[in-house]
């Protein structure tokens, strides 16, 4: 799973930087974010120390921000910041008993993440919540409805392809178990995002 997440993210970013007119790169890249969301939710629920987990995410987010802006020509916040924000929302929701307050927290966080903007914005937060709280048999349908909502709100046609890994999560048990067995070293997994963005930023500068 980690290898697939890194590969599809790399393909997405290479396409965005060097072949922006070719949609196939971005279509393949739509697979990456649900994989990272899945990994985030699994890490959040299984980690032995959430404070250390948050610290690691914070360091990766900080190291990634400048390469993210340089490589992808963006003024927003990188996707790891979005994942980190999602963790903080999960922490608050897990300690909140009132449904009304929970809805208010999600609404405010969604607005802030769209306004600043965070990478994936409100969509990213809502997908994290779906992966955290939706029953497995409804996961595909909730993800599908989220994609349809943002198709109408933002015109995100390519994001419809992001449903593919979720379908595998739910229906591809045998395939997924085999993918889960393919592990990479923790330092590779944690450093991949800032390192590959730094390399793309250097290549972006080099081509000019």
Image (tube, rainbow, N blue to C red):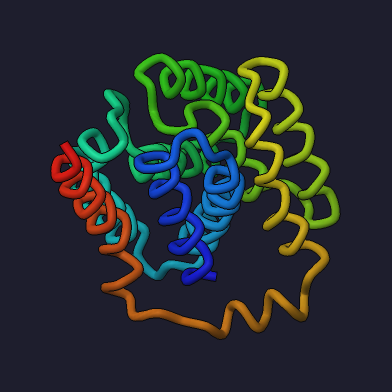
- Residue depicted at 61% across the width and 45% down the height: 27
Corner quadrant of residue 84: top left
Residue 74: where, in percent of width, then height? 30, 28
Q: Nearer the viewer, residue 142 or 104?
A: 142
Name the image quarter holding the N terminus. bottom right
Q: Nearer the viewer, residue 141 or 16?
A: 16
Q: Is residue 76 above or below residue 53?
A: above
Name the image quarter holding the C terminus. top left
Q: Is residue 8 above or below residue 65?
A: below
Residue 94: where, in percent of width, then height? 54, 44
- Residue depicted at 38% across the width and 21% down the height: 117
- Residue depicted at 82% across the width and 65% down the height: 171
Q: Is residue 176 above or below residue 194?
A: below
Residue 195: where, in percent of width, then height? 23, 58
- How many labels, in total? 0
Horizontal side of 22 relative to 79 (left or right) equals right
Residue 61: where, in percent of width, then height? 26, 46
Horizontal side of 166 relative to 24 (left or right) equals right
Q: Is residue 35 above or below residue 147?
A: below
- Residue depicted at 72% across the width and 23% down the height: 149
Corner quadrant of residue 179: bottom right
Horizontal side of 62 relative to 184 (left or right) equals left
């Amino acid at each position: 799973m980690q290898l697939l997440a890194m590969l599809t993210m790399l393909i997405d970013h290479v396409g965005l930087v060097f072949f922006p007119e070719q949609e196939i790169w971005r279509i393949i890249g739509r697979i990456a974010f649900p994989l990272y969301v899945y990994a985030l939710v699994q890490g959040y629920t299984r980690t032995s120390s959430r404070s250390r987990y948050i610290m690691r995410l914070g360091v990766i987010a900080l190291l990634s921000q400048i390469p993210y802006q340089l490589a992808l020509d963006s003024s927003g916040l990188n996707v790891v910041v979005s994942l980190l924000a999602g963790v903080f929302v999960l922490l608050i929701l897990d300690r909140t008993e009132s449904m009304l307050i929970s809805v208010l927290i999600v609404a405010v966080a969604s607005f802030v993440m769209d306004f600043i903007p965070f990478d994936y914005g409100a969509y990213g937060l809502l997908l994290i919540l779906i992966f955290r709280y939706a029953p497995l048999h409804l996961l595909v349908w909730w993800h599908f409805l989220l994609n349809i909502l943002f198709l109408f709100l933002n015109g995100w046609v390519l994001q419809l392809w992001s449903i593919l890994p979720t379908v595998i999560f739910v229906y591809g048990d045998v395939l997924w178990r085999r993918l889960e067995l393919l592990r990479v070293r923790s330092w590779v997994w944690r450093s991949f995002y800032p390192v590959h963005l730094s390399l793309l930023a250097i290549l972006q500068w080099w081509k000019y």
